[in-house]
Amino acid sequence: MSSPATDQHLRDLTLLRRVRDRMDREYAQPLDVEALARGVHMSSGHLSREFKRAYGETPYAYLMTRRIERAMWLLRGGDLTVTEVCFAVGCSSLGTFSTRFTELVGVPPSTYRAKTRTTTGMPSCVEKQVTRPIRNREARPAAPQLA
């Protein structure tokens, strides 16, 4: 028999998964924590606390990382300008987009675009893994696996 607290925690996890799935699908739409919380009938504070507890980062940080991942893909293969990419992924401020991109990727979007336009010599599946942004900088690196 489960306790009411356990039942509530499981319901919250289900709602948090819905929020995360919505951000994955609608990353280019104007989303904010209040709108996401309303969609699952939670307060924005409760959503933020529980999301961070479950996924290790705030809803805003998760959404921005998702947007940056998509921006990296657009910059690697498209003919869009950095400004066009910024707006295509749902960011409304070029400055915020560039700052967050630089924090996650390590170089500004224009530098990233210039570097990836040259041939890397890596298979695309390897390049995708190597160029993936780091979601949670506070997370500790995994311990080396012994064979």
Image (cartoon, rainbow, N blue to C red):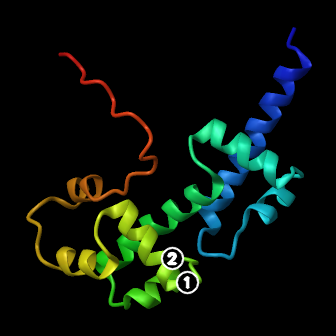
Local crowd size for mark 1, using a 10 Å CA cut-off: few (<14), some (14–19), many (≥20): few
Residue at image mark 1: 93
The answer to whether residue 142 of the structure is visible from this angle is yes
In this picture, residue 95 sits left or right of residue 125:
right
Secondary structure of the residue carrying numbered label 1? loop
The answer to whether residue 70 of the structure is visible from this angle is no
Question: Label 1 to label 2, Cα distance in Å?
Answer: 5 Å
In this picture, residue 96 sits left or right of residue 107:
right
In this picture, residue 18 sits left or right of residue 120:
right
Quarter of image, res 73: bottom left
Q: Do the residues labelled 1 and 2 touch (CB within 8 Å)?
A: yes
Residue 96, disc: 2
Secondary structure of the residue carrying numbered label 2? helix
Residue at the location (86% across, 22% down)? 5
Residue at the location (48% across, 82% down)? 95
Q: Estimate the x, y position of residue 43 in percent, counting from the top left.
A: 86, 52
Amino acid on which disc 2 is placed:
Thr
Task: Kindly give the residue lying farthest to the top in the view shown.
Answer: 1
Q: Estimate the x, y position of residue 112 in percent, counting from the top left.
A: 26, 74
From this view, report whether residue 14 is shown above or below residue 102: above
In this picture, residue 146 sits left or right of residue 25:
left
Residue sitting nearer the eye, 147 or 68: 68
From this view, report whether residue 112 is shown above or below residue 14: below
From this view, report whether residue 22 is shown above or below residue 18: below
Local crowd size for mark 2, using a 10 Å CA cut-off: few (<14), some (14–19), many (≥20): few
Residue at the location (56% across, 55% down)? 62
Q: Estimate the x, y position of residue 126 in percent, counting from the top left.
A: 21, 53
Amino acid on which disc 1 is placed:
Ser
Residue sitting nearer the eye, 116 or 143: 143
Of the 4 image quadrants, the one containing the N terminus is top right
Q: Estimate the x, y position of residue 2 in percent, counting from the top left.
A: 85, 13
Quarter of image, res 145: top left
